[in-house]
Amino acid sequence: MPSYTVDMSRSLTRSRQLQLRAEKFLPGGVDSPVRAFRAVGGDPPFVTHAEGAYLFDADGNKYLDFFGSWGPMILGHAFPPAVEATQRAASRGASFGASTAAEADLAELVTRCFPSVERLRFVSSGTEACMSAIRLARGFTGRNFVIKFEGCYHGHSDAMLVKAGSGVATLGIPGSAGVPAETAMHTLALPYNDLDAVREAFAARPNEIACVIVEPVVGNAGTIAPAADYLQGLREITAEYGALLILDEVMTGFRLSLGGAQQVYGVKPDLTTLGKIIGGGLPCGAFGGRADVMELLAPLGPVYQAGTLSGNPLAMAAGIATLSHLLKHEEEVYNGLESTSARIAEGVAGVAREAGISLTTNRVGSMFTWFFTDKPVTDFASAATSDTVAFGRFHRAMLDAGVWLPPSQFEAAFVSTAHGEAEIGMVLEAARKSLS
């Protein structure tokens, strides 16, 4: 395989100093493991600010951003209406621990876009949303077992770290220390895109499975699309056995379309989890769905869930500004994202072919992954055939060329509306240098 060229003119002196300082106070110097760059090597830049499609670090370097705070920055960084709305909200107070009208305002926008969500509750993260949805499903059905899929990441709650994707896959950790076997035993991890495995699990435990939770398009093992009729098959099987179907749209919600993956693929779940984009870049998540299920939540029902910062006024303000823009400019936003993302993903794939490098490109809308393998990637097992060492070299070379990709082979890249003609040209030129 050809070696990748590297431009060593980029200085990271200040970022290295900041990393060493951070390591005195934070485990590994980070608050989220993938930020440490252990999977790709090199030094992680320390960001000072961002604007549009770009990140800027403490050494004055400028990077074209392709992870977008791991998904939420669909309109680019520092989107002016979201910034202004957040500033206005902050001037009135950052948190009250009491209800505000903005919570129902944002909820109304969400339910307009997601008809399957009749009631919802805001939380502060995708992890909280998935954890709460699963608890609710267990309370509604009176059952304990949960089906998830290998390589899908639904946050870091104990039950969901079994064969998870995202940073767990990036670091090669099969699960997590600190998770009791008694907890993990109720999670059934099956291969993604394999309906027969789901049928067999339900046949073996017909009255014990509370729910199936799935990323409708996997983003946490790299981008992996559902096979034809896969999601509809999950819908039919869960309905047959009286289990709930939970679509984890923390990543795909509002990104693949205004109504998320469920709109794209025409499937109606019982519950949906959301995050990322609904907070306009601020910490926010939500779970919602059928009214009869959601009304089991306290104070109406016996399933308890709470959060002091849930419905935080700053996150509500940023979310309202973001979703309002998406609703008003739906056609322009999503057609533009589709076109730009296709040119970037397919353009770099073409550069790799010209260089004789094996690369499988998976893309759904504005999320994509370049897998360093010559095999089709349809599940976590096939994603795991990727040459992660080659990806690490590619990542370092692209970073030196000013393009910041997700620092993991097993994470999706994201495009924003701030990526335009200049950015398409920049990433293709960086790829030519990096893959030569």
Image: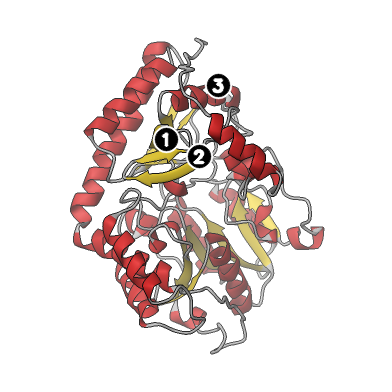
Where does label 2 land, which residue? 222
Instruction: Indicate which disc, 3 or 1, sits on the residue closer to the N terminus.
Output: 1
Q: Residues within 10 Å of mark 3 (few under 14, many from 20)?
A: some
Residue depicted at 57% across the width and 41% down the height: 35
Secondary structure under badge 2?
Answer: loop
Q: Is residue 202 left or right of residue 278?
A: right
Q: Amino acid at mark 2?
A: Gly
Q: Position of residue 274 (x, y in %)?
A: 45, 63
Q: Position of residue 332 (x, y in %)?
A: 19, 50
Give the distance between the C-alpha atoms of the residues marked 1 and 2, in whole angstroms: 8 Å
Nearer to us in this view, 96 or 301? 96
Nearer to us in this view, 356 or 49? 49
Secondary structure under badge 3?
Answer: helix
Q: Residues within 10 Å of mark 1 (few under 14, many from 20)?
A: many
Give the distance between the C-alpha atoms of the residues marked 2 and 3, in whole angstroms: 15 Å
Proximity of marks 1 and 2: CB atoms separated by less than 8 Å? yes
Where does label 1 land, which residue? 362
Instruction: Indicate which disc, 1 or 2, sits on the residue closer to the N terminus.
Output: 2
Where does label 3 land, which residue? 390
